[in-house]
Image (spheres, helix red, strand yellow):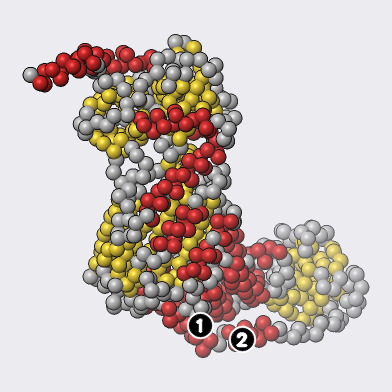
Amino acid sequence: MRVFLLFLACIFLQPALSNSDYYSADTLFENFSQSIFKVRIVDISSGSQSSIGTGFLVDDGSLLATNFHVISSLINKPEQYRAEIELSGKVYTLEVVSFDVVHDLAILKSSTQEILGQPLALSLESLNKGHSLYSIGNPHNIGMTVVEGTYNGLVEHRFIDSIHFSGSINSGMSGGPTITNRGNVIGINVATMGDQVGFLVPADKLDALLSRFDTHKNLDHHDLISQQLVNFSEQAIDKLLQKPWPSEAMVNAKVAGQISDSLSCWGDSHNNKENGLKTTSKGCRNQDSIYINRHFTVGSIEYEYRHFSADSWNSFSFYEYVNQITSGATAGNRTNKDDANNYICQNSVIAATEKSFAKKMSYCVRSYKNIKNLYDTFYIATSIDQSNEAIMEHFTLSGVTEISAHRFLDRFMESASWE
Amino acid sequence: MGIVVEIINRTGHVQHCQIFDKNSITVGRAYTNDVVIADTYVDPVHASISCSGDGNRETDFTCQDHSSVNGIFDIKGRKQKIQSHWHSGQVISLGKTLLRITSPSIPVPPATRLSAWEKASDILTQTRVIIFVSSLCLLLATIDVYLSSFAVADKASEYTAVLYLWLALVFYAGIFAFLGKAFRQDSRFWLYYTLICGSTILVMSYDLLSGLIFFNLNLGVSSWFNIIAYILIIALLLNFSIRFALSVKTITRIAIVSIIPSLVLINLAIQMKNDSEFNWRPQYDVTAYTQTLYLAKPKTKADVLTSSQTLYKKR
């Protein structure tokens, strides 16, 4: 009886939730297809589309939300590209209002400032795993498509929140909405790992961007990117440094274990009986990658320790081998010559301290060409106090401020020691 | 009075010399001639050469063509008449053979003093020097393979690299010997062999020691030191090659002789150019050795942290 009353109350209080108002894929598409558009990025000199994505109306219906990576060419080369949508036979050129490069979101408006249609509502409620979701977009430019899938909570081992959507998201659907069966946008399609593993930007990130984009008005786009990345990297490094690092055993040494939940860690070991070489490795890295343009991503954080020992080798051969093995390390993020300067390195030999062994260290820093105050840093060091045994320690941080990198370096240099 | 006939090659080196005490001689392939030339393009009795006067005037020598098939030419390839006039020291071309006609009374320049290089070449071609440089070269190569082959399962194939190196040295010396033979009838194989062995010893010692040099002097991977060291080694190689290969006269010969060293130089130039371009890999120093091999004073952690801050300011 009590359940029944509750049910009745629901009917009276929230008429929108009556049975007939739960959407299925067909009714959902019919209702919202007028608010979801194919966003074309057009190369101005050839007049043809160079890439496509999806966007949907938000706020009062005059703003269109999509991914930053859909419109990144407008930010990097505004003179070469323009964005447009088509609405009942008429083409509207779009302008970038603001963006959130960290969460891969952008909001656009028509250059005529007009309201383009009915906006979609954002859902800020939390769902249970397994909830049915409908993702809408234009995969590979074959036409607007609805894809059914399920909600699987937030992705683990990331600094940047991202919803795991079990359904096929394909290129071209980027920037499209994923909608609950109540008709609210839960997330924005952003990436896929293939095999039904898709990722969505949570709708609250878009809500936050909508509430503060006015403050971005007078900022140059590259300054805004810089400001957002600086905030992100400071928060991420703060999170890594706020607690003492857990220490883990590795052969006869102690190294830092998993220093944050936002990182995922791996380990491996090899014992070659033929030549007497033993190698053990341990490392952690994040899964985040912030898209700036096709050739340039930032936000990766990784560190690794390797232990080498070869009792039967002579010392010179042993270090020759260590040199050879440690010579290939490089940063994990993508860059090219238009976005980054070359690394500048400093090589030093550091005396043993109370907390760590004597080591030979190389520390390299690379600045970015268009984004101020951010750097890629690369650290590699090898212990030099044993004759047939050595530890290599390494980290790379991409897209960090000088202060954050310096604090991390300070801590990391004493993170490994002999037991 | 009298005639001197020298058979010379294209570079002017004398192959054969005959002196005649009479004023007229015959030249041809037949054995009855005064000067017998083994050249199938020369007639059995090709020409006769006569001398009038003491050999100091323009038309002292007269050359009479005996209706030969291929005729008589001067050094520039101009065909001569039946009777042509020559002065002392001029070169006549018959068939494919060059003859220089001189008067015995013409004075010849005094002997050239042996250069220090020529003396050095005598020392370098002594058997004990050859054995010493060969052994040192092979020893260094073996040490190099020994030190780097601990992690390799198939060590035998690594050691065959030593044999290949030795074959390459012999091949290099062979090329220079062949050039020497072709241009000045002097192959000097063992001289080139000791020179290339010496250069290889220099390069290998530098490779073995460079890690320690970088480590102790704290020099970077692509530092000026490395570049200068290689330029010096290559310049030495180039200098030796040119000095010993030939008596250098023309730019073409310099080019031929310097082919191998310049291949190394070009490679170095390409490397230097790439260093200045965008490199997604950090050019860090990988050398690390035990503390016992370390000479300079290590820095403290605080010093390193402070100095690392300058990296952010650079572009």
Residue B107 placement, left or right of A338:
right
The residue positioned 44% from the left and 70% from the top of the image is A360
- Mark 2 — on which chain does it sit? B
Q: Is residue A213 above or below residue B34?
A: above
Marks 2/1: CA–CA distance: 15 Å
Q: Depth check: give the residue in front, A348 or A162.
A: A162
Q: Quadrant of residue B118?
A: bottom right
Q: Which mark is residue A369?
A: none
Q: Amino acid at mark 1?
A: Val
Q: Which residue is mark 1?
A: B133
Q: Which residue is mark 2?
A: B122
Residue located farthest toward the bottom when viewing the structure as drawn? B128
Q: Position of residue A333 (x, y in %)?
A: 43, 48
Tell us which disc is closer to us: 2 or 1: 1
Q: Position of residue A279 (x, y in %)?
A: 29, 66
Q: Depth check: give the residue in front, B103 or A417.
A: A417
Residue A162 placement, left or right of A398:
left
